[in-house]
Amino acid sequence: MLSEAVRQHITTPLTNPAFPPTIPRFTDREYLNIVYRTDPEALRAVVPEPLRVEEPLVRFEVMRMGDVTGFGPYTEAGQAIEVSHEGERGEYLHAMYLDNFPATASGRELSAYPKVMASPALRLDSGALVGTLDYGSIRVATATMGYKQHELDAQTAREQIALPTFMVKVVPGYHGAPRVQELVRTRITDITVKWAYSGPARLQLFEHVLAPLADLPVLEVVSASHILTDLTLAAVEPVFDYLKKDA
């Protein structure tokens, strides 16, 4: 394979890439969101500077992807922490768990999404929407919400899920120290809210050393929503370089 051909590839294996070279469009992306209040000190221990924690709020989400360009259907769960950066309100993506390897690899390599493999699920059970997350054979999260009890305004729903999001991009070097270590920003674009509901909800997090969601304990459930959308994710852009001496 000529050097020029190698330069055309964005991931390995060169003859069978881990993920397709596409900008994914998400169709019928279904959200279960539960916003909860947690321990402020626990947040300060995990949210990197220069992000600021204004209120100790975390959004636990389970997302069932109806169809994604290049990846097909899959499910994802995780925690997003409410933050601000230079006066802009947003969310810091703390942890994400997927059941699709190409989507996991693409999110980590092309962007900076903190994705790992696990077994999230979203289903309906006796009038309740149920979101779960298993790591291996161990249950680490269970979320329940009353199914379609109160209609939610589309603009309010859009504002809930289209906030700017921040992540830390790390590319390791060959001798231990990182080659790239940046805070990056992205946001959802071209979003259509097909329907949205709110309702009562509960959230349980269980301790696991390799999936430490419970390190951000649930002190109070603040709100919950169930939203169906079509959307696209914008490319990330760096906003802070941790490797610069004046950072």
Image (tube, grey):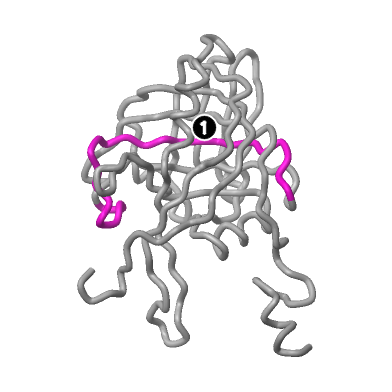
Label 1 crowding class (10 Å Cα cut-off): few <14, some 14-19, many 20+?
Answer: some
The magenta segment is: 45-69
Q: Position of residue 121 (x, y in %)?
A: 63, 36
Task: Specify whether 240 is left or right of 40.
Answer: right
Q: Quadrant of residue 102?
A: bottom right
What is the total number of numbered labels drawn onto the structure image?
Answer: 1
Q: Is residue 33 magenta?
A: no
- Is residue 226 left or right of 55 when viewed as pictured? right
Give the quadrant of residue 66: top right
At x 70% / y 89%, what residue is drawn? 3
Q: Residue at x 46, y 20 (%)?
A: 201
Q: Is residue 38 above or below residue 24?
A: above
Figure quadrant of the C terminus: bottom left
Near-viewer residue (68 or 174): 68
Pick the residue in front: 155 or 116: 155
Residue at horizontal 24 percent and vertical 49 percent from the top: 44
Q: Residue furthest bottom?
A: 2
Please state the horizontal and vertical placement of residue 147, each as a whole percent of the image. Answer: 58, 15
**Is 44 positioned to the left or the right of 106 in the image?**
left
Residue type at the position of mark 1: Thr
Q: Position of residue 150 (x, y in %)?
A: 51, 9
Disc 1, SS: strand
Is 56 colored magenta in this rendering? yes
User: Could you tell me residue 93's position as x and y percent?
Assistant: 43, 48
Pick the front one: 222 or 243 = 243
Residue under numbered circle 1: 142
- The residue depicted at 26 percent of the width and 46 percent of the height is 42
Viewport quadrant of the N terminus: bottom right
Q: Nearer the viewer, residue 239 or 204?
A: 239
